[in-house]
Amino acid sequence: MKKTAMVFLILLLVLILHSASANEKVGKEVIELSGRDKGNIAFPHEKHQKAVKDCMICHSLFPKKMGVISDMITDGKLQDKQVMNQCLACHRDMKNTGEKTGPTSCLQCHKKP
Ligand code: HEC
Ligand code: HEC
Ligand code: HEC
């Protein structure tokens, strides 16, 4: 009896620890992305980590590092608006299928017209 209770407790602990790490956010909640002449874009990263789940949908285009998009554009490793087109493509597709998604109009992301 004592042994079963012990095993149960250990299993419970493993379960709690596992769900805690699964819900753990990685990095900042909102990341300020540079839209150069169009002003900054407030990107809700944590919301996307939860809603999109597969990190590599975005991070196959750029690594998991702060400020990397601007650096890659400067170095010519990413084209102007390449990331933006990825944002827009996903939002438009989901909008078309009636799912809850992000903005598709310029001024909802860009602070400057
Ligand atoms: C919808 C696109 C998208 C998804 C999905 C996504 N990320 Fe990111 N991530 C970004 C962008 C954009 C940046 C900022 C890059 C920059 O600053 O140039 C970023 C930056 C990061 C950073 C560095 C910044 C920080 O706050 O530490 C880490 C770490 C990171 N992502 C981890 C992850 C992990 C882990 C997942 C999956 C659970 C994930 N990301 C899913 C778009 C995404
Ligand atoms: C979902 C958010 C989002 C929407 C909607 C959006 N953009 Fe962007 N835009 C970005 C991000 C993020 C960047 C910076 C990364 C890049 O260049 O790919 C950017 C960059 C740009 C740039 C490059 C700025 C420069 O000076 O080089 C231009 C121009 C631009 N957007 C115009 C537009 C226009 C016009 C629309 C409406 C049709 C639009 N954007 C809609 C997120 C968005
Ligand atoms: C693979 C799909 C996908 C990609 C790529 C993506 N998004 Fe989103 N976006 C979503 C979904 C789903 C939501 C709705 C999340 C929610 O409300 O929980 C969302 C919501 C948003 C919101 C609104 C959040 C709110 O509080 O209402 C903004 C702003 C946004 N996205 C900006 C961006 C920018 C900027 C990029 C590119 C750097 C991007 N998204 C890339 C799927 C995506």
Image: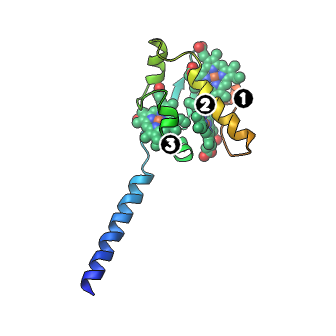
Given the image, on which type of amino acid does mark 3 rest?
Asp
Task: Say whether residue 112 is visible.
Answer: no
Q: Which residue appears at 60% of the width and 25% of the height? A: 84
Among the two numbered marks 3 and 1 on one chain, the one whose residue lies closer to the N terminus: 3
Q: Mark 1 is on which residue type?
A: Ser
Residue at screen point 65% across, 31% down: 89
- Judge depth for marks 2 and 1 and give the one in front: 2
Q: Earlier in the sequence, mark 2 or mark 1?
A: 2
> Disc 3 versus disc 1: distance between alpha carbons?
25 Å
Q: Secondary structure at mark 3?
A: loop
User: Which residue in the protein does label 3 denote?
Assistant: 54
For label 3, being within 8 Å of ligand 1 is answered: yes
Q: Residue at x 38, y 64 (%)?
A: 16
Q: Secondary structure at mark 2?
A: helix
Dot 1: what SS? loop
Q: Is residue 99 visible?
A: yes
The residue beneath circle 2 is 87
Q: Nearer the viewer, residue 26 or 40?
A: 26
Indicate left or right for 99 with 82 as reference. Answer: right
Q: Nearer the viewer, residue 69 or 27?
A: 69
- Ligand 2 is within 8 Å of the C-beta of the residue at disc 1: yes
Q: Is residue 8 above or below residue 93?
A: below
Q: Is mark 2 within 8 Å of ligand 3?
A: yes
